[in-house]
Image: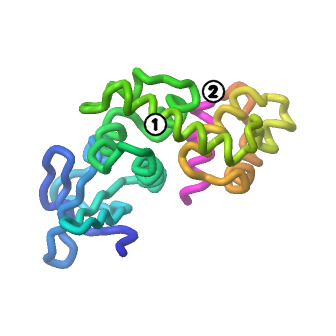
């Protein structure tokens, strides 16, 4: 089981990066967002997911841990395989995906190549169910949000972070010292993710 691959970027192609590690070139399937941060001949570190089936073994790699977590969440949705998950994460960032799920924004998901309305609806429904199970059906509010009275954006951000696979305890710890006053939900998500992926 691989956790990350670090080496020199030998080649880039649509949805693919070849990373040279000690003379071995690893073909890593990836998103447009990750590809945009890689340069041939430069060093790179990708967090990887091993996709193993009877007839194949593929690596999927991501520039950030949050993008990898999103990928892992997406492939738990029925009917969403690795290729569809890569397509979605090529069209949206983890923060945008989380907000799209929370707001029921099908258009953000159908902007991904090969993702139709039915798949978008399933992603929204199943990932929203995860939030409901994690929070017991109530709106989650991080400690800092409760203290500052800015529950709206902070509560939305916390629920969106659950979509990305973080637990209530992890979210509460990450958001405890963030001054959420005047911040949008997406800004809060970005700030919390920076703390959680250190």
The residue carrying mark 2 is 184
Residue 17 in the image: above or below residue 182: below
User: Which residue is drawn at the image coordinates 27% and 63% (left, top)?
Assistant: 59
Q: Main secondary structure of the magenta part?
A: helix
C-alpha separation, residue under disc 2 versus residue under disc 1: 23 Å
User: Which residue is drawn at the image coordinates 46% and 41% (left, top)?
Assistant: 94
Q: Quadrant of the N terminus?
A: bottom left
Left or right for 161, reference 61? right
User: Quick one: SS at disc 1?
Assistant: helix
Q: Quadrant of the C terminus?
A: bottom right
Q: Circles 2 and 1: CB distance less than 8 Å? A: no
Quadrant in which residue 108 is drawn: top left
Callout 2 crowding tier (Cα within 10 Å): few <14, some 14–19, many ≥20: some
Q: Is residue 96 magenta?
A: no
User: Which residue is drawn at the image coordinates 38% and 62% (left, top)?
Assistant: 47
Taking the view exactly as shown, the residue that stands out farthest to the right is 147
Front-most of residues 102 and 137: 137
x and y percentages locating residue 160 in the rendered image? 60, 38
Q: Is residue 194 magenta?
A: yes
* Magenta part of the chain: 184-198
Q: Give me the disc on residue 123.
A: 1
User: Which residue is drawn at the image coordinates 57% and 48% (left, top)?
Assistant: 193
Query: Does label 2 or label 1 sit earlier along the sequence?
Result: 1
Residue 55 in the image: above or below residue 158: below
How was the colour assigned to the protein in this rendering? rainbow
What is the total number of numbered labels drawn onto the structure image? Answer: 2
């Amino acid at each position: 089981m691989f956790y990350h691959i670090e080496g020199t970027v030998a080649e880039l192609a649509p949805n693919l990066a070849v990373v040279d590690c000690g003379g071995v070139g690893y073909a890593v399937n990836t998103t447009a967002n990750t590809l945009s941060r890689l340069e041939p001949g430069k060093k790179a570190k990708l967090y990887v997911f091993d996709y193993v089936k009877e007839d194949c073994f593929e690596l999927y790699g991501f520039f950030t841990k949050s993008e990898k977590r999103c990928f892992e969440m997406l492939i738990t949705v029925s009917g969403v395989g690795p290729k569809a998950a890569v397509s979605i994460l090529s069209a949206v960032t983890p923060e945008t995906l989380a907000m799209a799920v929370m707001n029921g924004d099908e258009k953000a998901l159908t902007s991904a190549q090969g993702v139709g309305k039915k798949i978008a609806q399933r992603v929204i429904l199943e990932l929203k169910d995860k939030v409901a199970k994690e929070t017991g059906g109530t709106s989650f509010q991080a400690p800092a949000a409760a203290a500052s009275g800015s529950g709206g954006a902070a509560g939305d951000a916390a629920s969106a972070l659950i979509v990305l696979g973080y637990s209530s305890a992890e979210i509460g710890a990450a958001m405890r010292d963030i001054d959420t006053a005047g911040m949008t939900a997406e800004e809060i998500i970005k700030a919390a993710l920076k703390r959680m992926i250190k």
